[in-house]
Image: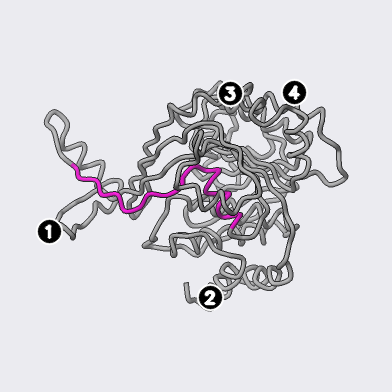
C-alpha cells in the first residue's frame, strides 16, 4: 500500500494547480433504474440483484410474455464526456465542454456542470440512457437519434471555424472527445481535426495530453473500429495520446486488430502490452472492475482498487476513474500514482454517488490506508 501512501502525500503538494482542459463530445440524460423483483407495498420493493437473474426472468418469458416493473431512482447528467467533465470540475480544472447538452436551451440536468465550466458549446439535443443497475454490473439502453445531426461541418461551423478550434485546443493541457461508439460521426470529426486543425497547432516541447474512451464498441463493425484505432494513433503526432478501456473492451480491440494473445501467463498484462504496441500511442489504460493497469513507455503498471461490494451508484464509475487518471497525468504524476488516483476517484464515487473534491480524494486515500473503506 506504499503507492496509496505516496499518492496522499503527493496530492497535498499539488493543491492550487492551474490546468485547462477541453472535453466532448456527447451528452446524455441518464435514468438510473432498478428492475423490481418483488414489491411489498407501494413504497417498498426488492430489486433484481444480478444481470444473470434479470436474464433468467426475460428468458422464462420466451414464447409467453412478462411484465417487469422499472423504478427510476435518479435522473442525472450522463454520457462519458459530461461525467468525466463533471468529475474534473469537482477537482478544480478549468474546463471547456463541447457536445450535445441541448439546443437551443441546455437540458436542466447539465445546468450545474455548465455553471462551473469556463465555456460550453452545445450543438443539439442530448441522447437518453436507461441505466439498469445490478449488484454485479449494469445494462445501458441508449437512445441516440438526436446525435446524428452532429457532423464535422456542423461542429466546425458552430465552433467558429478551424482557427478558433486550433486556438482553443492549443490552450489546453488535455483535450478529449469521448463516446466514439454512440456518436455516429465521431470518426469523421476526428478526421476533420487531423486534416484541418492539426496543421494550425503549435509543436511545444512538451506535448499536451489527448484522452479517448470508446464506450463499448461491440455494436460497431470491425472496419469501423479499425479506422477509429488508426485515427487515434494519428493524434500521437500532436499529443501524448491516452486510450482508456475496460477489460471487456481491451479483449475486443485485440481481436479486431488481430493481436494474438496467449492464454498462458498473465492474460490481462499480455493483452494490454500487445494492444499498446499495436496502437503506437503514449498510453493504454485499462480498468477491470477490481483493479486498473496501464502501459506507458513500454512498461506495465498495475494496482488493485478499493473494491466496493454494494455500491450506491456504478453508472459513471469508469468515467470517474478516467478523470482521476487524466488529472494525475496532467499534474505529472507517475503511472502508478495516476492509476491509484483513478481507482481512488472511482472508489469514492461508487460509495457516495458523487464525484470527490481534491480534499475528498486525499481523505479517501488516507482512509483506504487505514482500512476504513
Q: Earlier in the sequence, mark 4 or mark 2?
A: 4
Mark 3 crowdedness (10 Å alpha carbons): few <14, some 14-19, many ≥20: some
Badge 1 marks a residue whose secondary structure is loop
CA–CA distance in space, label 4 to label 2: 48 Å
Task: Judge depth for marks 4 and 3 and give the one in front.
Answer: 3
The residue that mark 1 highlights is: 41
Identity of the residue drawn at 62% across and 50% down:
117
Q: Are marks 1 and 2 in contact (CB under 8 Å)?
A: no
Q: Residue at x 13, y 59 (%)?
A: 40
The image quadrant that residue 15 belongs to is: bottom right
Judge whether residue 299 is colored magenta. no
Q: Nearer the viewer, mark 4 or mark 2?
A: 4
Does any portion of residue 265 appear in the rendered image? Answer: no
Residue hosting label 2: 367
Q: Earlier in the sequence, mark 1 or mark 2?
A: 1
Nearer to me, 289 or 87: 87
Image location of residue 207, percent across then percent down: 80, 43
* Res 236 visible: yes
* Disc number for residue 279: none
> Which residue is disc 3 drawn over?
151
Label 2 and label 3: CA atoms lie apart by 46 Å
Q: Could you tell me residue 46's position as x and y percent?
A: 21, 57
**Local secondary structure at mark 4:** helix
* Nearer-N-terminus badge (4/1): 1
Amino acid at each position: 500500500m506504499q503507492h496509496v501512501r505516496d499518492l496522499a502525500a503527493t496530492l497535498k503538494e499539488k493543491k492550487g494547480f492551474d490546468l485547462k482542459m477541453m472535453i466532448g463530445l456527447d451528452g446524455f440524460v441518464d435514468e438510473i433504474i432498478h428492475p423490481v423483483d418483488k414489491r411489498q407495498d407501494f413504497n417498498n420493493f426488492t430489486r433484481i440483484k444480478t444481470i444473470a437473474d434479470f436474464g433468467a426472468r426475460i428468458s422464462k418469458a420466451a414464447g409467453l410474455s412478462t411484465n417487469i416493473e422499472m423504478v427510476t431512482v435518479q435522473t442525472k447528467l450522463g454520457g462519458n464526456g459530461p461525467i468525466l467533465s463533471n468529475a474534473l470540475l469537482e477537482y478544480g480544472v478549468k474546463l471547456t465542454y463541447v457536445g450535445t447538452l441541448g439546443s437551443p436551451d441546455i437540458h436542466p440536468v447539465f445546468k450545474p456542470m455548465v455553471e462551473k465550466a469556463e465555456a460550453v458549446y452545445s450543438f443539439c439535443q442530448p441522447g437518453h440512457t436507461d441505466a439498469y443497475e445490478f449488484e454485479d454490473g449494469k445494462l445501458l439502453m441508449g437512445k441516440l437519434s438526436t446525435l446524428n445531426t452532429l457532423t464535422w461541418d456542423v461542429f466546425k461551423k458552430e465552433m467558429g471555424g478551424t482557427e478558433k478550434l486550433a486556438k482553443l485546443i492549443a490552450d489546453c493541457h488535455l483535450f478529449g472527445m469521448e463516446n466514439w461508439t454512440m456518436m455516429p460521426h465521431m470518426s469523421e470529426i476526428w478526421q476533420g481535426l487531423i486534416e484541418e486543425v492539426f496543421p494550425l497547432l503549435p509543436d511545444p516541447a512538451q506535448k499536451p495530453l489527448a484522452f479517448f474512451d470508446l464506450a463499448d464498441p461491440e455494436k460497431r463493425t470491425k472496419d469501423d473500429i479499425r479506422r477509429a484505432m488508426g485515427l487515434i494513433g494519428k493524434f500521437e503526432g500532436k499529443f501524448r495520446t491516452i486510450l482508456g478501456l475496460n477489460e471487456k473492451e481491451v479483449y475486443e480491440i485485440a481481436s479486431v486488430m488481430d493481436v494474438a494473445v496467449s492464454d498462458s501467463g498473465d492474460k490481462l498484462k499480455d493483452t494490454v502490452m500487445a494492444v499498446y504496441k499495436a496502437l503506437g500511442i503514449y498510453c493504454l489504460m485499462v480498468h477491470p472492475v477490481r483493479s486498473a493497469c496501464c502501459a506507458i513507455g513500454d512498461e506495465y503498471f498495475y494496482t488493485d482498487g478499493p473494491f466496493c461490494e454494494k455500491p450506491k451508484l456504478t453508472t459513471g464509475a469508469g468515467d470517474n476513474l478516467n478523470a482521476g487518471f487524466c488529472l494525475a497525468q496532467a499534474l505529472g504524476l507517475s503511472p502508478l500514482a495516476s492509476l491509484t488516483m483513478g481507482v481512488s476517484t472511482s472508489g469514492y464515487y461508487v460509495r457516495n454517488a458523487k464525484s470527490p473534491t481534491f480534499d475528498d480524494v486525499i481523505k479517501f486515500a488516507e482512509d483506504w490506508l487505514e482500512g476504513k473503506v
